[in-house]
Image (cartoon, rainbow, N blue to C red):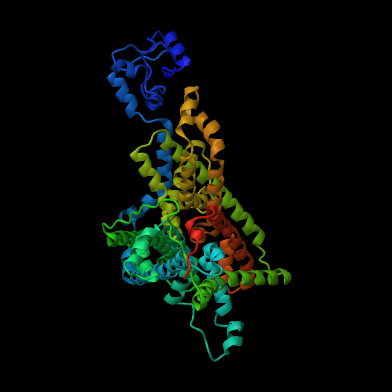
Amino acid sequence: MAHLPASTAAGRLARGVRGEPAGAAGPAHPGLGRRHHRPDRRGGGRAAARRGGRPDAGGRVALSVAGRTARRRRPPGWTVLGVCTALVVAGPLVALPLSFVIGGEAFGQIARTLLPQALGRSVLLGVGVAAGTLVIGGGLAVLVSFYDFPGRRWLDWALVLPLAMPGYVLVFVLVGQFGYADPLQSSLFGTGLQLPGLRGPAGAIGVLTAVLYPYVYVLGRSAFLGQSRQSMEAARNLGCSYGRAVRTVALPLARPALAAGAALAVMEALADFGAVSLLGYQAMTDAIYRVWYGAFDQAAALQLATVLVGLALIMVVAERLLRGRARFHQALSRGDAVVPRRLHGWRAAGATAVPCLLLALVFAVPVAQLLAWSVESVIADRVGAGLGAAVFNTLLLAAASAVIAVITSTVIVYGQRVRPSRIGAAAARLASVGYAVPGTVIAVAIYVPLVWLDRRLIDGAEALAGASIGLLFTGTILGLVCAYVVRFHAQAYFAMEARMARIHPNLDDAARALGADRARVLAEVHAPLLWPGVLTAALLVMVEVMKELPATALLRPLGGDTLAIMAWEATKDSRFDTAALPALLIVTVSLLPVVILIRLWSRRGPGSAADRVTPG
């Protein structure tokens, strides 16, 4: 029975029943009363034993020192289950460093011939995308955060829309519009003039920069809106112009956010397979695919994948080292945000025209072209015969992956809630590393444990029942779902973690005091409160699975084409009308998380400093 404050009649009555003195248990401070008078979960009468008193008569008996130590060291079952689940999710990534121990001899030849060129192209791609996204995304974030111009309010959220355009879909549209035999180019410029080709480093960097700049824009915008105007005013008082104050004060303070956005863009660029493959730019992801399917050397492909992961880590660590020990803390009080400055004349017209032109080239025109091609293909009855099967396969894979990812994330998050530990936190973070690993790497890494598991299952079935079973994971939908869960577990985990953190621990304490075990607390207390997080996590995972191309291309079973595979293969064969409808469906689905982000932005209260404007 829990202790009650001395000032209440219920507290006096409870102490009378237990035979305690009237003033023995009431704390002097009411806040301390709530802390010190919770039910003692670790054994009866521990506090009373330390005070020299007797354990209470409610059935609690003082534990011995050895018993207390053993119970303290024995983690709850949910914690163990959460750690084990996290390790299972992250298990395939262990095959990456082991590849150089168990790998074949072909890597030496590949390292002398294929690796230098592919690695150099990936480095160039990463550096180019980092620079491009910083210039475009950072510049647009500065524009909408510090200046006011016509159309600023809708451009504020519209500039996020290119995030819904997968790189391979944009390449598909650009190749169809400005390819070598393009009628639009010939009609505009004639047959004697050819525009610069999309193939090569410039095309790959340009396309990926166009679809990845929102990472820098979103994080940079949030950082700028979170800055105090006092720093800007201090710079103005020292004689700086408004533009110089933005460059010398606001930009350095937002450097961590801009660098984080650029790092995300670089990881996405290094992980891209569809765009670089369609453009003929043989980067590391394309090299892994060719070694896997061309040379049929899984060990060498795994070693190349390890090199690619190392390259991504080196770029992230390099940014941290360049940052050094610099700190970017800044106090911000309510209503203290920077107030945008109004632009006039040609400056206002240019500030509106440049973002609109970018949106037209990257999002509006490609979507319109996809829609036109889709209508033409439907009218001419040239829709791909496998479109219905591709839609079914995509939805099936997305739903199955979302369900499993939500379940594993819930187990890991709840295990950490039951008893937080460093081991559990490390295992949870390790299980979330998959999102930073390219899909080609995940596909190659998960192939090794799936083959081992299938062999053990086949041997076990023959030994126990004398029956021969086929492959259950390798080359099947189950194996593909496993790859998706490893790849996109982070989305589900962070969504569930954020939702679980909003549930007050007092609800757990109350349910436990009423005799509910951990499973019942999760099912009857947490589950109803977690539904928004569950839906968000499932939606994010489903959208990512529908867009995923490299892992699907490497692991899909025969007849298991998805919308992404259908669009990619039709584009390789220059069947743009066949690829249009699957690509349009992918873009439409990809808009869902972007719409959620825009709705979150629109909840910003009216009257904030960002909505006020200073005259130019």
Q: Residue furthest bottom?
A: 192
Residue 66 seen by the camera: yes
Q: Residue furthest left?
A: 325
Number of callouts in the render?
0
| Residue 600 locus on image (x, y percent) | 53, 53
| Residue 479 locus on image (x, y percent) | 50, 51
| Residue 90 locus on image (x, y percent) | 41, 47
Q: Is residue 549 above or below residue 451?
A: below
Q: Of 550 and 5, which appears nearest the observer?
A: 5
Image point 46% across, 58% down: which residue? 439
Residue 106 seen by the camera: no
| Residue 357 locus on image (x, y percent) | 54, 74
Q: Of 585 and 235, which appears nearest the observer?
A: 235
Q: Of 365 and 296, which appears nearest the observer?
A: 365
Image point 44% across, 13% down: which residue? 12
Image quarter of residue 595: bottom right
Q: Is residue 47 above or below residue 481?
A: above
Image point 58% across, 49% down: which residue? 399
Q: Quadrant of the N terminus?
A: top left
Q: Of 12 and 506, which appears nearest the observer?
A: 12
